């Protein structure tokens, strides 16, 4: 039953996302929900201006419908799916507000940095509180690659670190969404990893959400792969970040994010290093452009090449993480 449920969730997520795209994209075009290109962004992306955004609603809706169906049809073991989905939806809502402001005011800036931070911290805290009060939050930190190794962390320190990790990771996923299909392509193997871990940890119920999202992302890539007909927007990228972090904490393995989230981390660090060095050196740069996918673009890499390399790296890192949690 568990394997059938997972396969149905993947297939259902794919079909729902693919079909929704047929209706959502024309609707977004009619609403003039086009992407604004940042003035400081790569000039060669100017031809993408006007491409419909908020397309992340496709895989969000597909995931919600699949999880809801699993809840009604096979309620046992589905509670954790709802908590993790709740976190992803809270971040998706923050992203939607950001996208809506951009579209409504025809500008490339939505919520302010402070507004985003406050909302993201609040969402993270609510998620951790839900895990805590449902007795699903462990303060015994699991350490991959060391069999049976856990580190007991003081509760307040763990909670503060968890909020920092969640907010940081979610925004790193958001940075990864800079070229056609990249964030969706990189996140798909991460979802597969969490499906396999849930199954091996005998928490098959928790596999429903990543299974539905994996299918939804594959359906979305039909429209988002280069040349993209639609962008996921902050609506989609923040939802994905919430999903990745939520699953890691629900399975009590946040340290695995270092491996499965390797590309996210590299993207974020390249941006931080670039900005920091620029300020310290009074105008000098380490990368030709940040985040790092733009650096490779300026080196002559096509968007397709960057996509295949980054996705391949993620698959390799997920395989390494799989070894680490099964020693």
Image (cartoon, rainbow, N blue to C red):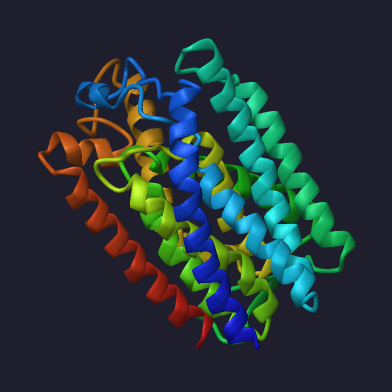
Q: Quadrant of the N terminus?
A: bottom right
Which x, y percent locates residue 257? 51, 61
Pick the residue in front: 235 or 43.
235
Q: Looking at the picture, does residue 42 appear above or below residue 141?
A: above
Where residue 303 appears, x then y in whole percent?
A: 21, 44
Q: Is residue 36 above or below residue 120?
A: above
Q: Is residue 140 visible?
A: no
- Say left or right for 225 vs 241: left
Residue lying farthest to the left in this orientation:
300
Residue 278: x percent and y percent? 32, 23
Left of 299 or right of it: where is 240? right
Above or below, comparing residue 12 to residue 272 in the picture: below
Q: Residue at x 47, y 24 (%)?
A: 30
Residue drawn at x 34%, y 39% as measured from the top left: 270
User: Residue 210 in the image: x percent, y percent?
Assistant: 57, 66
Residue 154 visible in the picture: yes
The front one of 154 and 4 is 4
**Going by the image, does 130 lie left or right of 306?**
right
141, 71: nearer the viewer: 71
Q: Is residue 129 above or below residue 231?
A: below
């Amino acid at each position: 039953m568990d394997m059938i449920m997972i396969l149905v969730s993947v297939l259902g997520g794919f079909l729902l996302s693919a079909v929704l795209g047929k209706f959502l994209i024309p609707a977004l075009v009619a609403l003039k929900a086009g992407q604004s290109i940042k003035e400081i962004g790569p000039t060669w992306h100017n031809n993408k201006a006007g491409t419909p955004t908020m397309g992340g609603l496709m895989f969000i809706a597909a995931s919600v419908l699949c999880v809801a169906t699993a809840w009604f049809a096979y309620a046992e073991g589905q509670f954790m799916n709802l908590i993790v989905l709740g976190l992803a939806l809270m971040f998706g809502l923050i992203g939607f507000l950001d996208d809506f402001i951009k579209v409504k005011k025809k500008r490339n800036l939505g919520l302010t940095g402070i507004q985003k931070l406050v909302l993201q911290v609040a969402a993270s805290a609510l998620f951790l509180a839900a895990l805590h009060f449902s007795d699903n939050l462990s303060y015994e930190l699991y350490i991959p690659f060391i069999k049976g190794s856990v580190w007991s962390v003081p509760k307040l320190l763990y909670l503060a670190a968890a909020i920092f990790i969640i907010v940081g990771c979610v925004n790193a996923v958001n940075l990864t969404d800079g070229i056609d299909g990249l964030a969706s392509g990189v996140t798909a193997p991460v979802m597969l990893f969490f499906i396999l871990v849930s199954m091996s940890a005998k928490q098959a119920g928790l596999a429903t959400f990543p299974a539905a999202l994996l299918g939804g992302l594959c359906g979305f890539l039909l429209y988002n792969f280069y040349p993209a007909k639609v962008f996921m927007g902050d609506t989609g990228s923040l939802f994905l970040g919430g999903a990745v972090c939520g699953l890691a904490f629900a399975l009590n393995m946040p340290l695995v994010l270092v491996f499965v989230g390797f590309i996210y981390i590299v993207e974020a660090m390249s941006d931080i290093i670039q900005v920091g060095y620029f300020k310290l050196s009074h105008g000098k740069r380490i990368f030709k452009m940040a985040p790092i996918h733009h650096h490779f673009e300026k080196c002559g890499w096509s968007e397709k090449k960057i996509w295949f390399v980054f996705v391949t790296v993620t698959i390799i890192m997920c395989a390494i993480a799989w070894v680490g949690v099964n020693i």
